[in-house]
Image (cartoon, helix red, strand yellow):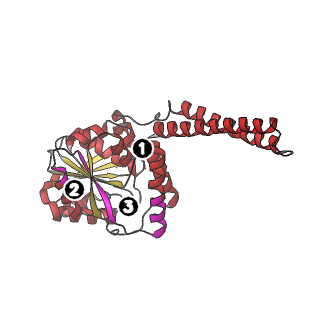
Amino acid sequence: MSVDSPTIVVVTPVFEDAEASSRLFKELSATFGQRVHVVAVDDGSVKQPVDLARMDEVALAGTVIRLRRNVGHQRAIAVGLNYVAEHMKSSRVVVMDSDGEDLPESIPSLLERLEDGSVDVVVAERRSRVESLRFKAFYAVYKRVFKLLTGRNISFGNFMALKPFAVGRLSAMQELWTHVASCVLGSRLRVVTCALDRGPRYAGKSKMNFVGLALHGFRGVMVFAEDVLVRIGIASAVLGFLAIVGGVAAVVLKVMDFATPGWFSVALGILLVVFLQTGSLALMSLMLSGVSKANVPSLADYRLFIDRVEHSAAAA
């Protein structure tokens, strides 16, 4: 089904959070009226599925994409962006969470920066956060590890505004199914940041536990698996070279009779183990770099996740 392109399309994933999503629909309708079309991706919710009637109550033009099963936050966004790329090709798109932490009143700030002809994507960089000290500490460590492994800085999440060209480009990238923010970093699109505050949740508690958060972080690194593997391979080669130098030095000291009893055999044994381990790690890195991006859904597969698509009365 083709939908007339509105001024703004908001793509938001929802999982078992009907109360929060209903409030988001109300605020988007009050803020943008008929200029907005919401694409809510219901990520296999069972207890609290997205209620289409809530859109009709506030006269909001919207589409609810109900997935066959729970596919995860990032893949739900990927489904939504692929749907928009196919059905609403001329609209500017905002990706945001439905829990209230991404504020609807911040959308105009993102869209204003998007007016620049030299910008394809505007991402929200958090100016203030409403999170625990544990989360802040983990996020600070994660950003530094991400920089070390990939050579890139990441300081944003899913809240972003995109031009139609950017939506089409991202929807054609397999990395979108793994991690949205990392996909944007690797897309070579022209990206700028916009400092915004993060709001409190509308209702309930976050369903992302520490294990899920850590897994999400690892997936961000996986998008740049080839870069990471090459860096690991180089580091392993350097350590292997240093082990060889150390071994040669140990032999020289032994020949010159500077080694104490038992020292030579222990030192040479340790250096040999280090060399073999780093050599194996370097070889594995080179082998894995060829298969690091396999088994990711392609553009044509997104429809396989969809159970049905429903439209509000205002979008009909």
Judge whether 144 appears above or below 223 on screen.
below
Q: Is residue 20 magenta?
A: no
- Tell me which amino acid carries mark 1: Thr
Q: Identify the residue under disc 2.
A: 110
Q: Which mark, by number, is residue 48?
A: 3
Q: Position of residue 106 (x, y in %)?
A: 23, 62
Badge 1 marks a residue whose secondary structure is loop
Q: Around disc 2, counting alpha carbons within 10 Å, would you say few (fewer than 14), some (14 to 19), or many (20 or more)?
A: many
Q: Position of residue 54 (x, y in %)?
A: 24, 62
Q: Name the foreground residue: 225 vs 56.
A: 225
- Name which of mark 3 and mark 1 comes first in the sequence: 3
Give how far apart the Cα atoms at labels 3 and 1 are.
25 Å
Q: Position of residue 174 (x, y in %)?
A: 38, 37
The stretch in magenta equals: 113-140
Badge 2 marks a residue whose secondary structure is helix
- Name which of mark 3 and mark 2 comes first in the sequence: 3
Q: Which mark, by number, is residue 178?
A: 1
The quadrant in which residue 253 appears is: top right
**Residue farthest along the right direction in this orientation:** 261
**Residue farthest along the front direction in this orientation:** 256
* 112 to the left or right of 13: left
* 215 to the left or right of 275: left
* 88 to the left or right of 220: left
Badge 3 marks a residue whose secondary structure is loop
Q: Around disc 1, counting alpha carbons within 10 Å, would you say few (fewer than 14), some (14 to 19), or many (20 or more)?
A: many
Q: Is residue 89 visible?
A: yes
Q: Position of residue 2 (x, y in %)?
A: 18, 40
Q: Quadrant of the N terminus?
A: top left
Give how far apart the Cα atoms at labels 2 and 1 are.
24 Å
- Name which of mark 2 and mark 1 comes first in the sequence: 2
